[in-house]
Image: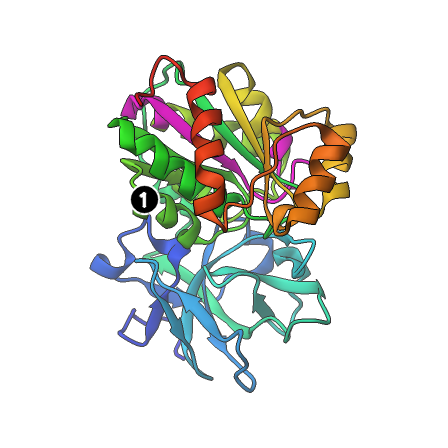
């Protein structure tokens, strides 16, 4: 690649670029000195190594594609701290420029710890930063301004005991049920690591609008607390401008992980009418309750996959547990819980 390589059809724009105009107006690629790198910088990486099932990329429209060696991926520098899959940070990228796709959405950094149950995270080599003229482009450059306003919207809060605990599945079904009352719903994912398909799922379920931290200029929410607080205020301003009847809000991962989930929950707390906790196992429910002081209104997720799990959860916590993978059995109880939480908004 030449020092100034103009964007071409061979550049694959990952979903972290969905807030940009890169596809319409193009860009150049130039290496930058390491001292000028920062979280949220758009960079180009060249895919290396022998393809595995993890050589997948989520495009700006949310579609998943397979990638091949030498493909050029446009993503953003960031950090990830996933309990079940992988940990990495952009600051760990060495002088050799070797890095990894920490998520399929184009969150790029160097993997520092990965699960032995997975193939290695897709490797790439640093080609350069995304440039226009002498300016390197960052996610924050594409975040439109929004007026400051107070949020006065009832909230369904979705939290989990870990990643992949079933929060998005729970949110999808809750949105689907709420839309039966012709309510205006916003689906949001306030914390986590970039992946567009989660909030797209909320849109598919009927949400009138969707938003996540990428819209606020972050590739993940593993960032300093002050940085995330500013992004959270921005996202809440965007939600308030949409004037929804209900906000269904997911705090990705778990509130105890370094994704600033506790900051998001604090910002929403006074508006929360219903808390749904998705749990990986029955005892994890007790752990979150004890460690975070969070009392959910219902439990979902793998902990409820069998009648034995449901019985144990309810025995340990006294909280209703629903297997939402079996809608025929669980939806009547879910509807009852929703009507109790929103008696002023839901109709029979």
Q: Position of residue 229 (x, y in %)?
A: 55, 28
Say if 58 sits above or below 195 in the image: below
Q: Position of residue 85 (x, y in %)?
A: 65, 61
Q: Say which quadrant the C terminus sits in.
A: top left
Q: Which residue is mark 1?
A: 203
As rendered, which of 13 and 104 lies closer to the eye? 104
Examine the rendering and report whether any part of residue 256 can be seen: no
Q: Give the x, y percent position of residue 84.
A: 68, 58
**Which of 122 and 34 lies nearest the eye of the viewer?**
122
Left or right: 331 as drawn, with respect to 317:
left
**Towards the viewer: 260 or 90:** 260
Residue neighbourhood size for the residue with mark 1, other residues' Cα within 10 Å, grouped as few (<14), some (14–19), many (≥20): many
Does 162 appear in magenta?
no
Q: Is residue 323 left or right of residue 5?
A: right
- Residue 258 part of the magenta-drawn span: yes
Disc 1 secondary structure class = helix
Query: In the shown orientation, is residue 278 left or right of residue 24?
Result: right
Stretch of the chain drawn in magenta: 239-262
């Amino acid at each position: 690649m030449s020092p100034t390589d103009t964007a071409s059809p061979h550049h694959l724009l990952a979903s972290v670029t969905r807030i940009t105009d890169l596809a319409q107006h193009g860009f150049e690629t130039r290496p930058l000195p390491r001292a000028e790198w920062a979280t949220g910088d758009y960079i180009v990486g060249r895919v290396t190594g022998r393809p595995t099932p993890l050589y997948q990329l989520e495009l700006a429209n949310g579609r998943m594609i397979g990638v091949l060696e030498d493909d050029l991926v446009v993503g953003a520098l960031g950090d990830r701290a996933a309990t079940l899959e992988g940990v990495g940070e952009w600051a760990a990228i060495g002088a050799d420029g070797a890095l990894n796709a920490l998520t399929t959405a184009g969150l790029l950094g160097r993997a520092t710890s990965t699960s032995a149950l997975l193939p290695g995270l897709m490797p790439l080599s640093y080609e350069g930063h995304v440039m226009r003229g002498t300016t390197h482009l960052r996610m924050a450059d594409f975040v439109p301004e929004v007026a400051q306003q107070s949020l006065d919207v009832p909230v369904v809060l979705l939290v989990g005991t870990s990643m992949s605990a079933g929060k998005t599945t729970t949110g999808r079904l809750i949105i689907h049920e709420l839309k039966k009352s012709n309510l205006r719903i916003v689906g949001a994912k306030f914390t986590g690591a970039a992946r567009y398909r989660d909030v797209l799922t909320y849109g598919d379920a009927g949400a009138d609008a969707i938003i996540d931290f990428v819209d606020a200029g972050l590739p993940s929410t593993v960032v300093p607390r002050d940085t995330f607080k500013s992004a959270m205020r921005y996202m809440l301003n965007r939600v308030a401008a949409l004037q929804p009847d209900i906000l269904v809000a997911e705090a990705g991962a778990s509130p105890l992980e370094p994704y600033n989930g506790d900051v998001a929950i604090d910002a929403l707390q006074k508006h929360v009418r219903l808390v749904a906790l998705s749990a990986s196992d029955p005892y994890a429910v007790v752990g979150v309750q004890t460690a975070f002081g969070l009392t959910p209104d219902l439990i979902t997720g793998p902990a409820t996959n069998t009648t034995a799990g449901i019985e144990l959860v309810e025995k340990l916590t006294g909280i209703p547990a629903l297997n939402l993978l079996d809608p025929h059995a669980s939806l009547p109880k879910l509807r009852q819980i929703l009507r109790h939480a929103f008696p002023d908004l839901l109709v029979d």
